[in-house]
Amino acid sequence: MDISWVFIAFGGWLLALAFLLKIFNHPKRKLPPGPRPWPIIGNLNLLGSLPRVSLHHLSQKYGDLVLLKFGSKPVLVATSPEMAKEILKTHDAIFASHPALAAGKYTSYNYSNIIWAPYGAHWRQARKFYLTKIFSSRTVDSFEYIHVEERRTLISHLFSLSGKPVLLEDHLPRFTLRTISRLVMSDRYFNGQLNLDASIITLETLQRMLDGWFLLGGFRKFYKYVLEEHKAKKEDYVPEDMVDTFFHLADDPNLQVKLTSDRLMGLIHDLVSGPTDTSAATIEWAFQELSRKPNIIDKAQQELDRVIGKERWVEEDDFSELPYIDVIIKETFRLHPLAVLLPPHYSIEDCNVAGYDIPKGTTVFVNGWSLGRSEKCWDRPEEFISERFVENNIDTKGQNFALLPFGSGRRRCPGYSLAMKSVRTTMANLLHGFKWKLAGDMKLEDISMEEIYGLTTHPN
Ligand code: HEM
């Protein structure tokens, strides 16, 4: 026999042995169920115009944990409170990262902010700053006067429109932007105090840029200006806003990750863009629901009249006496979570979730919209029934996995207290100060509950 045939036969035998060893040494992984992916597109063909609805339907067919492919990338969808808990609590450390998406790269100065930052030293340090300095209860309380002043401006403006049809979406985003921009960088850029070059920015342009979210170039020019202007007055440091606080933190020579100007801009952008849309849209959704349920408005106003009376406005300290306002907000979050799908999480190690093997590098969506509509957790889930929260202490801070408007675990929203402060005092005062009725000949059944889907959802 030719010697080369011996080598070929021997090589083939070795290959077969290696293949068998691979099979027997690595038992087949048990992956979650899901539809068979197509080459190249994977399962992207199954996503419709409202992805959370498409994912909800897939979970009804395949179960609470569904494995998909977006292109060639594995994507896991968690749809029940039990599975949300597995991802955000039991395996929180493994899923606390976010995938490196192009959207994150180009809207966050190359992941320099916190919202898109991967789990790592920069995220940990920024998160610590947010929790201990920027959103500490002392800092949040010290800025209370800004909330009060801006709320009064909003209310007087609405008062001047009494009797005319008012669209809240024309007023609330501007009000939340004014409030947050004062908290973050003071209002001297917008109140004419600085003789600003008009090409830098106006509040209206900032608002338009936030609506168009992806135009980071314009933000960069403005944020650079804000940083330089703050730096120039740094000598006699008395922190007046959040940018001052960041500068103070940046001076620490022992920082693990240096706060470069891109990182500072990323963090400022989180603070300006995060709350403007979310807080305003929550109040818009609440009023959209309340206008279909005048009896809930009556009940809330009775509580306000009893506790506050007719002579004053509602203040932050009043809320321990206003439980009914709280339950309206919880019910709004249940039916209309702003992040219908929590921002994508990402596994940094292989792990096992509920008996299934989840490979490292899997993107995970927790479907917050489905959680709020789970028939197992909520009676008549499609209906807005604020009373369902009256006799229980279900909270929205991420402990109850059927209600996660702010997420849960390591990535939970750090702006929770600020957001709640803004949403409940604004809502309570709008209910306390005005009589609400539908404009013109509009009827209850004309109110649309359709949503506009985006980074957050809004009533249409
Ligand atoms: C009603 C108002 C708000 C809602 C519903 C909301 C909701 C959320 C949600 C769902 C997340 C993602 C959690 C996750 O990844 O699992 C988040 C993250 C975040 N939110 Fe909010 N938020 C609100 C207001 C605010 C405010 C007022 C601020 C700051 C001023 C803020 C700053 C952030 C930041 C920085 C993150 C990223 C946290 C991280 O990745 O570690 N949010 N928020």
Image (cartoon, rainbow, N blue to C red):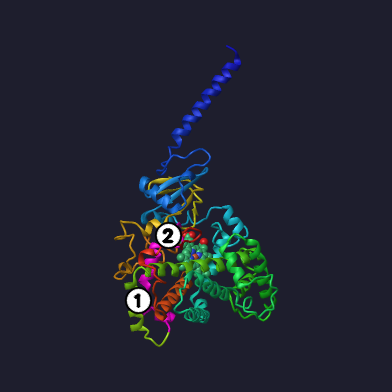
Residue 262 vs residue 174: left or right? right
- The disc labelled 2 sits on which kind of residue? Glu
Crowd tier of the residue under label 1, counting other residues whose Cα lies within 10 Å: few below 14, some 14–19, many 20 or above: many
Crowd tier of the residue under label 2, counting other residues whose Cα lies within 10 Å: few below 14, some 14–19, many 20 or above: few
Q: Of circles 1 and 2, which is in front?
A: 2
Give the residues in magenta.
Answer: 313-341
Q: Image point 44% across, 70% down: which residue?
A: 283
- Taking the magenta stretch, the answer to whether it contains residue 329 is yes
> Which labelled disc corresponds to residue 300?
1
Residue 383 point in image, percent of width and height: 33, 62
Q: Image point 51% across, 59% down: which residue?
A: 455
Residue located farthest toward the top when viewing the structure as drawn: 1
Position above or below: 347 against 219: above
Ligand 1 within 8 Å of disc 2? The answer is: no
Residue 237 point in image, percent of width and height: 64, 80
Q: Earlier in the sequence, mark 1 or mark 2?
A: 1
Residue 320 vs residue 254: left or right? left
Ligand 1 within 8 Å of disc 1? The answer is: no
| Quadrant hosting residue 328 | bottom left
Asked whether the viewer can see residue 414, the reply is no
Q: Nearer the viewer, residue 331 or 89?
A: 331
Residue 338 vs residue 321: left or right? right
Residue located farthest toward the bottom when viewing the structure as drawn: 311
Q: Image point 48% across, 80% down: which residue?
A: 155
Position above or below: 54 against 107: above
Q: Disc 1 on helix, strand or loop?
A: helix
Residue 42 point in image, percent of width and height: 49, 42
Residue 272 point in image, percent of width and height: 56, 68
Q: Disc 2 on helix, strand or loop?
A: loop
- The disc labelled 1 sits on which kind of residue? Ala
> Which labelled disc corresponds to residue 450?
2
